[in-house]
Image: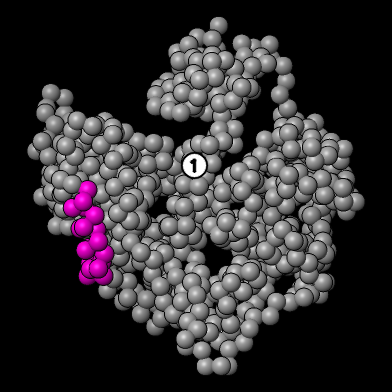
Amino acid sequence: MYTSQDQQRIFQLSKSILGNTLPSDAAIVAPQLREIIVYADWCYYVENEPVLADAEYDHLFAMLKKIEQDNPLLKTDDSPTQRVAYGISERLPTVAHLVPMLSLDNTYNAEDLNDWAKRCSGIIPEEQIIFCVEPKYDGASISLIYENGKLVRAATRGDGVYGEEITTNVKQIKSIPLSAAFEHSHVHQIEIRGEVVIHKNTFAELNKQRANEGQAPLANPRNAASGTLRMLDPNEVAKRKLSAILYHISDVSIDSGAAKPAALNSHFDSLQWLYSIGFPTPAKELKTFDSIEAVIQYCSEFEGRRDDLPYEIDGLVIKVNSIVQQEKMGMTAHHPRWAVAYKFKARQATSKLLAVEFQVGRTGSVTPVAKVTPVNIGGAMVSSISLFNEDVVREKDIHIGDTVLVERAGDVIPYIVKPLAELREGKEQKIIFPTHCPVCNELLEKPADEAVWRCINIACAAQVVERIIHFCSKDAMDIRGMGESNVQKFFDLGLLKIIPDLYRIDWTKVAQLEGFKEKSIANLQAAIEASKSQHLARVIFGLGIRHVGETTAKNLARSITQLRDFYDWDEEKLKALDDVGPKVAASIVHFFASSENREMIDLLEKNGVNIINIQQHKSTGGTFEGKSLLFTGTLAQMKRSEAEAKAEAKGATLLSGVSSKLNYLVVGEDAGSKLEKAKKLGTVIILSEQEFLELIEA
């Protein structure tokens, strides 16, 4: 889905935002943040390869939430802030969780924990709160369902609402009971959440065995656990000797007429109860405290002995102990309000900087990549580290030959914190940035307002390949089978030179290549043919216009009848659109003014690719014709997407935030700030969900 160059580009973008080197224009930064977070979620939950430090991810997520709160019109319904992070493998069947598996909000210091405790107290100001603390295990999340005492289903976390069904594999984990004595407590059905982990010693033995067999070592216990659960052969799963820690009861059904077990009234007692009937829980590590100050002290002390535990942990989880209080506090779309994670400090190690390579991305950006002596940090071997740009190198005064301090907060892509200048021997060399492109040898340029050097040769082979890869990617034209390796292969063989060549490939030559059988060719041809009918927004995103992400592409597509309309648009007209600021507008104008790009668009259309907005809004004469509408809060009778579809079918234009342009606000439970803002405006008609339905059905 994402190429190595995409990865480098997103790393560079995330570091630029974290380093405050990007412009502060919220309309530009918001879609960039969404792109980074969606990519990070995909890597973490689907590929089991985290690419951002937990602290960095949390900071970017918080930044996006703040931007959307301050600029409601920038919020989109598909924003990561509006839902639980997603990602489901297609290899296993999916099943619905009885209760959504939400993420946890994170804290990193005493101040954060105090703020969280104040928010909890603010919801139930007259009640005493007891806090329960447990280790935050670094493994793969699972959900187990028992019916009449029998394990009937196990699933991965998936997207939080649906997970992958892995019952057979979970049955290979000997620490998970296949049956339990729930009948004594009149429990008919129960859903239990937990984490699949690998004992540190078991992990070491596993890697030793793989080395003896000539196999590559597994990166870390978490990835090994997650990957094992997705294996298709249960026998191989059994060989990995997985363990599990169960830490939460998410749903329980009691026999009719029976009383709920008293143990289910508190988190502490519920885990002790599970432990007593044979479940692996953190019962021995659980601690309760009657003040947040005592929690903070315990967190500080515990971090020093994290390595004493048999399993990897990356922090502690603090929960409100009372289940009744948990229910009062509720949850957001992303996390429960009654629980929070306290994350431990980042892992660090030193290594030797051996060399620096320069990689060229899709937009011509030249990224320095440090090659270091392989070093194990937090369970993963690190040998390549992005240096992002020349300014970072100069600011940190990094030299080839330096001993450098490398950091990985959790299981993430590393970065160089600083060189250890005091260890220099005098043989170290300054990093010299190339004046010419390392691929095409064209002179590089560095715009005054940017931190990166760029190759401006649009025909540069590295850029051409990356543009084709981007065009074929899942979020663009979704040409499955035309991934990085095949694009590179076809390009090297001369079968692809520009994007439109995808639609005029010489298949007789492809048939002569190793690995391309009749079925694989037919599948690839079908995927290419299907891409011709993609929505215009995907075409715009696939063109790779600089600064134009998926959300901006959607807004652009909605504003035109067909792609060539942009030939006549100037920057002022573009800036009137959502998500388009000065920089984005200038980039769009520059792209469509190019004769090469116009020729590419002509060729795409000639080869059958849709460049028409076939989904433009048409008059319906419905209840909301000519009116704008926005939903807020949780709807009780239908999903948000269903309600929006009904509104659009009746002629409504959906907005992402409250403004003077809004006509109707439909309010569900926990409406929040949008409702308050609409009331202050005084011009917005506020509807309940039932009132909305009555208007729809009228």
Task: Report whether residue 145 is seen.
Answer: no
Label tally: 1
- Pick whichever, 326 or 203, lies toward us: 326
Q: Quadrant of residue 538?
A: top right
Q: Quadrant of the C terminus?
A: top right
In the picture shown, does residue 663 fall above or below 137?
A: above
Label 1: how many Cα within 10 Å (few below 14, some 14–19, many 20+): some
Question: Which residue is at 82% across, 45% downward?
Answer: 589
In the picture shown, does residue 401 fall above or below 605?
A: below
Q: Quadrant of the N terminus?
A: bottom right
Question: Which residue is at 50% across, 20% downward?
Answer: 680
Left or right relative to 411: residue 570: right
Pointer 1 residue: 65
Question: Which residue is at 46% across, 23% downward?
Answer: 676
Q: Amino acid at mark 1?
A: Lys
* Residue 561 among those drawn in magenta: no
* Residue 296 among those drawn in magenta: yes
Magenta span: 292-310
Question: Which residue is at 60% across, 69% downward?
Answer: 392
What secondary structure is the magenta-colored segment mainly?
Answer: helix
Colour basis:
one colour
Residue 682: percent from left, percent from top: 54, 15
**Secondary structure of residue under mark 1:** helix
In the picture shown, does residue 172 fall above or below 384?
A: above
